[in-house]
Amino acid sequence: MTDPVLSVRNLTIEVMTATGPARAVENVSFDVARGEAFGVVGESGSGKSLTMLAIMGLLPVGQVRVTAGEILLEGRNLLNLSFDELRAFRGKQVSMVFQDPMTSFNPVIPMGAQIGEIVRIHQPAATADEVRRRVVDLLDLVGVPDPERCYRQYPHEFSGGMRQRAMIAMAVANDPALLIADEPTTALDVTIQAQVMAVLAKARQRTQASMILVTHDLGLVAESVDRIAVMYGGRILETGGVDAIFEAPGHPYTVGLLKSLPRFDRAVDTLHAIPGQPAMVGNRPSGCLFHPRCGLGEGRVDCRARMPELLNATPAHWVACHARGETARWATRIDVDLRQRASALDRAVPGFSESQPLLQVENLHTHFRVARSRGWGREVLRAVNGVSFAIDRRQTFGLVGESGCGKSTLGRTLLGLHRATGGRVVLAGRDVAQMNRSRSRDLRRMMQVVFQDPYASLDPRMDIHDIVAEPLMINEMRDDARVRELMDRVGLPADAARRKPAEFSGGQRQRIAIARALALNPELIILDEAVSSLDVSIQAQVINLLKQLQQEFGIAYLFISHNLAVVRHVSDRVAVMYLGRIVEVGPSDLVFNDPRHPYTKALLAAVPVLDARRTRTKFVLTGDIPNPVRPPSGCAFRTRCALAQPSCARAVPELTAQGHPEHFAACFVAASNTPIRT
Amino acid sequence: MSAGIAMAMLGCLIAAMILIPALPGYDPYGQNLSAGYTEPFQTIEGKLYLLGADALGRDLVGRLALATRVSLAISVAAVAISMTIGVTLGLIAGFFRGPAETAIMGIADLQLSIPRVLILIAVTAIVGPNLVNLTLLLGLTSWVSYGRVARAMTLSLREREFVLAATTQGASPIWNIRKHLLPNVMPQMVIVGSFELGQIIILEASLSYLGLGIQPPLPSLGLMISEGQTALEINPWLSVLPGMVIFIVVAGVQFISQGFTAEGADARTSAMAAP
Amino acid sequence: MTRFVLFRIGQSVFTVFGVLTAAFFLVRLSGDPTALLLPEQATAAEVAALRTELGLDRPLWLQYGLFLGKALQGDFGMSFRQHSSALGLVLERLPATLELALTAFVLGIGMAFVAGLALRLSGSRRLRALFYWIAFVRQAIPIFWFGLLMILLFSVSLRWLPSLGRGGIEHLILPALTLATFEFALYLRLLDAAFSEQQTQDYVRTAYAKGQTRARTILQHMLPNALLPIVTVAGINLGVLLGGAVVTETVFSWPGVGRLIVQSVSQRDYPVIIAGILVTSVVFVLINLLVDLLYAVLDPRVRLS
């Protein structure tokens, strides 16, 4: 076995907090072999990004410092190097692809010059022409169309996906030995994510670089790396081959993560939710970091007493758990338990089917007049362009789509936050649009909302009691007992009432937002990406809570999300949107198991799945999502569609039934059910 | 920390301003021609002139105390007026948008397109300089910074999810403004105000120096400097001392303002700690 | 870009028009100027004659129209006190004001950039504290008092430089320094704040990740971005500079527009006041326009849209 490219030994990093220095990363060790793809998985606050920045020598000066350990790159300890010595490594031996392609480029320098810069720094002898040719080659390698023209363009003229391709081009410009990709696709849509991961793989193949892929997305690592390390609270809890770990996880935390993940390749009715809150910096439990949330080690003395060391279960699989021999049996017990809870849930859901749906949306349009990006005047953005669907009482209706598809605008139009340009919204048999302002306001109170951003949804100056009480106060129905009851229902401690939102974590804030949405006893709650910003383990808690509340209060949900697995998990029926229109709608099982629209098929194919061994026809949708202001004529999807015919450009396809009376797709060729070839 | 020191410094000065004129012998208007241009720490006719006397032999301590009180009163009142106008207009412009916003921001831009000193000079020339006019004018011409910040904050706050959620629960615009916008805008307004206070003190002194502010016989710091300038070669203290008072007051206010700003930044970046 | 330029030009024209309108109605508010122009014992007939001559007997909207028409031709009437055109008097003084303001601006912003870059490039906390103290102290001192202290030191005590009037370069030094130090304090803090904001941007981390040196990251990456917010507030600061110039001119008896306006106020010479304010506004609006166009050129996000 050759020497590893990178060897991290006992790395410890301290950050300054309000209460003094605290260890954010503790005693972390791992190796990355030559040519290997290594994944680092963890939720927010796990210390994974800090570890990567430490390797690059890019920790923020003054606030964060390495207090112990070694980082050996090609045998040299990077921590002993001066700034200038380290400079020779950065961008040459080791380079990094950052998370946010929007802000990681300098907005006032042309793209070509920014990529050329990394070449010029490390090859001072290269002439301007050589640098230019190298950059154009690189842009070509990562699949940026028309590299000559893009060379002169500025970052804001690139789409997110194109920027991330350019970032990869920059990272591999000097054939680095190690490439660090820190959440490289988190900011991107799923079809674009698939493109970027393919480009990353290609670039890596070309340069033979080793790679560290840092992500919170278990599916992504399953598909892209050989070995992984699972980090929690600044430590590695488990490391080994990706197949071995996903097959037989050795640490209860890993078990919990895997079981809290909604899967759309496998029907699971209830998610396992790891209880409690993650161990944040400066507030870490003593003993085993994970013991306050652990279901396996409950009651064990040594778990509370000391942090277990990372020991090998098999020669290539290391686990830091006192009870690691019992993990497998415990995992089976969870499965049994989940199945029992799921069947209890099934029995409880009444087979409701009313003749009249709760909400009926007919041919809804929401158009905006936006300033032209070039030239004079304004043009029309058809954010929602003729959408019809219905939601039954007690049902969850899922709405999926990528950015710019109009799903959030649709939700806000229903709430009355945008004015509908056309169409009808009938709520409980009454047309919302035809009422006067105050009557429609009364009706809309039956519809409440939980938004995505847990930080922006709560007024930072109000305390929790006042936030939950606000809907009641607005409607002059002050009722403190009800506020306490609501807080209790969503699992907030009673002493939360007089505290401010800043003291709560993202998951708890969403609970507060849910309590607020419940206050007026709504019939329908619109969940606009309500769990999207949460970590997997917290996400599972909130999803389970939502299901429980639905059962208890008989609420219907409109569940808007870009995350297909989550939508699959929660929805009874689902609609897929693309550029302002619904392209496919039907019962959740049918749409996900037997998708008819090529876009639905592409979306499903683009989502990384845990089951790495499952061979599937992986096909990558080409091109960017078109500008919604100027969508393609006819079928808006035809520009990216593998099945597109010339006729698709001429007319907009209607939703037609697809082999089941409730399953519809809007495609001219879908009916022929031609399999998509890669 | 340094804000504390500044606070103490300002406090001493203000206490001195209030207490000293109450003592006998510090009449700001009492003339004594034989004591004209007395330098500090000199005794004339058995009376100690701690900081000297002006051309008419008026004791400088008494005059400085009164002048500082006048300057501070005018400036604080002007800040209160301009903050009220600015917050109101900024909230209206940011929340209701439309023609109201166009009009309000148009006036703001127009006002910014003439230096504030020139507006004040021109309008004072017309309405005539006196204490009330000066206060009103300073207040009326200084609303723009509050208005712009309040509007910018309102624009972003009104799209924040907690305001949208309240709207879907049936909240009226008045409710949203009262419960959500104002409480979130005001802390920033206090920061702007603490910065503006220093600026207004200097502006008031400048106008009085130009002869367009407070009129004699009422003493004013700017006016005293201007009067002293004619006797620069005889007794420079007549100009230097009032200037030092302005410096101490403005520096103190700036220090406190910086403390506010830093605190504000802290509160924004770090989560609020439990009490 | 064209749209932006045309929009800004339109806005500038509107501003000048607004200033004219405001000036007209303010003067009308002030009452009848005949009392100022005629001796106290003037007869009613004399007053009426003068009112006709000045057009005060016509309807207000007509007076306004005439005023606008004349103003567009550069005619603001004759000075009440000196028998020459108001605009002529102002334009005569304009070069002196521009000389003072421009010298102070270039000097002040030059010093601010040297200091700002020096403290960034050196990364020295002590240097930063020193510059911040200087800026802090300077900003707490009113311009006119600072000018007086300069006179006291360099003219009265040391007798190195003249304290009054305009002439050779030695006359310019004190007033220019008075204003320039003020500009220095202003721009140093702005520049440093802008740099601090850029420091935390992701693209800076990207530059270091490429292996770029500290100096080049500061100069090539951060500086162009740090300039943008400074240019944005340049308009307001220009107003502060011109306002400061008015006061400075009075302290040093510098024969500029500001001093003329202040003198005219005490003489209630309205045509000169209006002409003076209008000329200042036009200069101000023009420079602001240029600065905004500069911003558009500096920021490709504006330039290319």
Image (cartoon, rainbow, N blue to C red):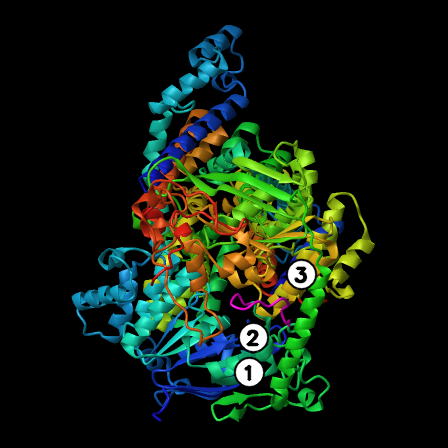
Q: Position of residue C250 (x, y in %)?
A: 44, 41
In front here: C249 or B105? Answer: B105
Q: Earlier in the sequence, mark 1 or mark 2?
A: 1
Label 2 sits on what residue type?
Leu
Residue that badge 3 annotates? A547
Q: CA distance from mark 3 to mark 1?
A: 27 Å
Query: Is C75 left, or right, of A271 in this rendering?
Result: left
Element under disc 1: loop
Amino acid type, residue under disc 1 in the picture: Pro
Inspect this view and state whether residue A599 appears: yes
The answer, for residue A275, to whether it is visible in the render is: no
The residue located at (34%, 87%) in the rendering is A74
Amino acid on which disc 3 is placed:
Lys
Q: CA distance from mark 3 to mark 2?
A: 20 Å
Chain part drawn in magenta: A263-273
Asked if labels 1 and 2 share a chain, the reply is: yes
Percent coordinates x, y for residue C293 in the rendering:
33, 44
